[in-house]
């Protein structure tokens, strides 16, 4: 099993503070004979009429020497996981969880804005010190 991201427990705590129940840690994915895993699965009741919202979360720290390389790797993993969820008909929204610092350095510039504007990726932005979610993109 791959090592957990340095922010794994921070994001887990932030989700729980936001009213989510962690259902999987890690969240198993399988396509054919290949087994993979995203970091977390979670769910919460939206309302009695709307039912339960379910998500899969991949946590990324972006602590490598190049934030562009980190973005390339995270984006590739995100797209692969999204395709597996679609192919296997697992009805969960996929989110990439990044710290506020990472969001401010990557996703507020043209490169990151392109991914958000074109709805390529969904983000959970968290504060790593207070362990809270500060933004969901898209809301």
Image (tube, rainbow, N blue to C red):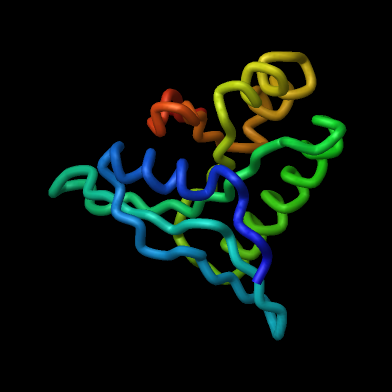
55 vs 70: above or below: below
* Residue 65 pos. (x, y %): 86, 34
Residue at 52% from the left image edge and 49% from the top image edge: 8
Quarter of the view holding residue 4: bottom right
Residue nearest the viewer, comparing 50 with 125: 125
40 vs 71: above or below: below
Describe residue 77's horizontal placement relative to residue 59 as left or right: right
Residue at 74% from the left image edge and 36% from the top image edge: 63
Q: Quadrant of the N terminus?
A: bottom right
Residue at 63% from the left image edge and 37% from the top image edge: 121
Q: Quadrant of the C terminus?
A: top left
Q: Residue lying furthest bottom in this view?
A: 33
Residue 114 shows in the view:
yes
Quarter of the view holding residue 99: top right
Q: Residue lying furthest left in this view?
A: 48
Residue 138 shows in the view:
no
Residue nearest the viewer, comparing 24 with 65: 65
Residue at 60% from the left image edge and 46% from the top image edge: 6
* Residue 35 pos. (x, y %): 66, 77
20 vs 37: above or below: above
What is the total number of numbered labels drawn onto the structure image? 0
Describe residue 104's horizontal placement relative to residue 76 as left or right: left
* Residue 54 pos. (x, y %): 38, 54
* Residue 28 pos. (x, y %): 54, 71
């Amino acid at each position: 099993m791959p090592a957990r991201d340095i922010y794994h427990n921070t994001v887990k705590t932030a989700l729980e503070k936001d009213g989510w129940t962690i259902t999987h840690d890690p969240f198993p994915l399988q396509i054919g004979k290949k087994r993979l895993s995203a970091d977390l699965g979670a769910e919460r009741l939206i309302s009695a009429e709307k039912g339960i919202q379910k998500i899969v979360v991949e946590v990324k720290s972006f602590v490598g020497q190049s934030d562009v390389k980190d973005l390339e790797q995270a984006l590739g993993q995100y797209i692969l996981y999204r395709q597996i969820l679609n192919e296997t008909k697992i009805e969960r929204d996929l989110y990439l969880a990044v710290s506020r610092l990472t969001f401010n350095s990557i996703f507020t510039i043209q490169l990151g804005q392109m991914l958000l504007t074109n709805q390529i990726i969904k983000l959970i932005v968290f504060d790593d010190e207070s362990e809270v979610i500060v933004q969901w993109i898209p809301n």
